[in-house]
Image (spheres, helix red, strand yellow):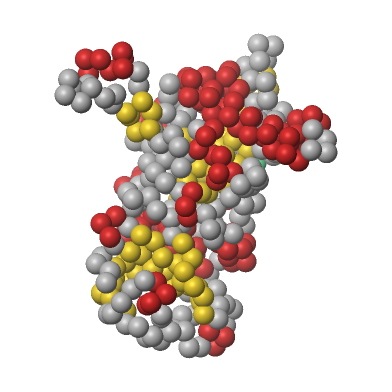
Amino acid sequence: MRSATCLPLAVLALAAITAATARPVCAQGPAQTPPMGWNSWNYFAAKVDDKGVRAAADQLVASGMKDAGYIYVNIDDTWEGKRDENGVLHTNDKFPDMKALADYVHSKGLKLGIYSGPGTKTCAGYPASLGHEEQDAKMYADWGIDYLKYDLCSFRPDVMYKQAPNDKAAQMQLMIAAYDKMGKALKATGRPIVYSLCQYGWDNVWEWGPSVGANLWRTTGDIEPRWQSIYDILSQQKGLAPYAAPGHWNDPDMLEVGNGKLSLLENRSHFSMWAMLAAPLLAGNDLLNMKPEIKDILTNRDVIAINQDPLGKQAHYAYSSGEVEVWVRDLQGGAEAIAILNAGSDVNETHPFRLDLAKLGLHGTEHAVDLWTGKKLDLTDHMPIQLASHDILLVRITEPR
Ligand code: GAL
């Protein structure tokens, strides 16, 4: 795994090598904790433009989200214009000056992200990077880009299905090589750019993502602002915990908090579980028209602290009883977070849920804090816990027994 960038000894010669240790100093790569920020796609899709991105940056600051840790402002698909005769990709009319936009975002203490893919076209049909990987990576670095989401899309028909028509294994090798190519191109720029793979989890990306320089990789298809979509994605994260670590994260897709018709409980449960999963927390809502209760969810510092825990261990699924499921996350210093989620559609279906501490490796009364009320809560073995449909109890236990 490549979680740190080690500079050549010569470069560091006088700076940081002590005669006693004589070891190279390794600068830590980006995304030592899951990236936090905002992305344009889930709410604005093709309507994203320069003005909207500046407004999102302003709102991250004004809402207190920046102070809570949301740093990346990520432009998704539809910023791309045409390539000129030298192969240089220009922005379209919606983005008159990407460098100026990056400067603006940086002036707010934030970072700017962008989107492309390894094929000829992005998913929305705009030019992508096939054959121009180094050129595009260099241009991103020149603009001051800090994050790249790289989406498979047309690479499938353009290359995989054409070059290896009936050979799934060869297709996957072509895909991995394409992601490796852009990973190397980004690295060659010398700029720390978070590299986010978007190929929907194909070929167990969590097993090879780190080897192509990825900092995160989508594990599933696209999220939608409906409970069933969120819950389906959550269910597909079982077993992926061992692949998350500082610098390398499973990505169950961007947040839908505040979007669609999700209820308040569903928004809260979605955010809680993404925090437990050590998922990137990329808000995908309309920040300018964000309701106070949505801002309260997105800026809950105690829940964010679970997500950003420096140990970098993703929660694992522990057990279910009826439609109530329990997930556990190990935290720095021996602490633990426990999430108890009622995934059922009716409270009666889960009656009565009783906590089984032994199944969590716990013994005796546990002193916990409920991270949504801030209140202390003692967890005892077999205590009944009643949760409304799609509600969650998220607690932190500082000294588990
Ligand atoms: C999809 C991707 C979405 C969004 C969209 C843009 O493939 O999963 O998150 O980026 O493309 O066209």
What residue sits 33% from the left and 50% below the top? 311
Q: Is residue 144 left or right of residue 332?
A: right
Image quadrant of ligand 1 equals top right
The vertical placement of 340 against 247, above or below, is below
What residue sits 52% from the left and 54% below the top? 240
Query: Where on the picture, by quarter, is residue 146?
Result: top left
What residue sits 58% from the left and 50% below the top? 219
Quadrant in which the N terminus is drawn = top left
Image coordinates for residue 279, horizontal then vertical, percent: 47, 52
Residue 226 in sight in this render: no
> Which residue of the protein is positioned furthest toward the top in this rendering?
86
Q: Is residue 395 left or right of residue 172?
A: left
Image coordinates for residue 93, horizontal then vertical, percent: 62, 28
Image coordinates for residue 12, horizontal then vertical, percent: 28, 17
The vertical placement of 296 against 345, above or below, is above
> Which residue of the protein is positioned furthest toward the left in this rendering?
20
Residue 213 in sight in this render: yes
Query: Where on the picture, by quarter, is residue 323?
Result: bottom right
Q: Is residue 163 left or right of residue 40?
A: right
Quadrant in which the C terminus is drawn = bottom left
The foreground one among 59 and 214 is 214
Q: Looking at the image, how many numbered discs can be counted on the residues?
A: 0
The foreground one among 30 and 335 is 335
What residue sits 58% from the left and 18% below the top? 135
The vertical placement of 132 against 280, above or below, is above
Image coordinates for residue 212, horizontal then vertical, percent: 54, 32
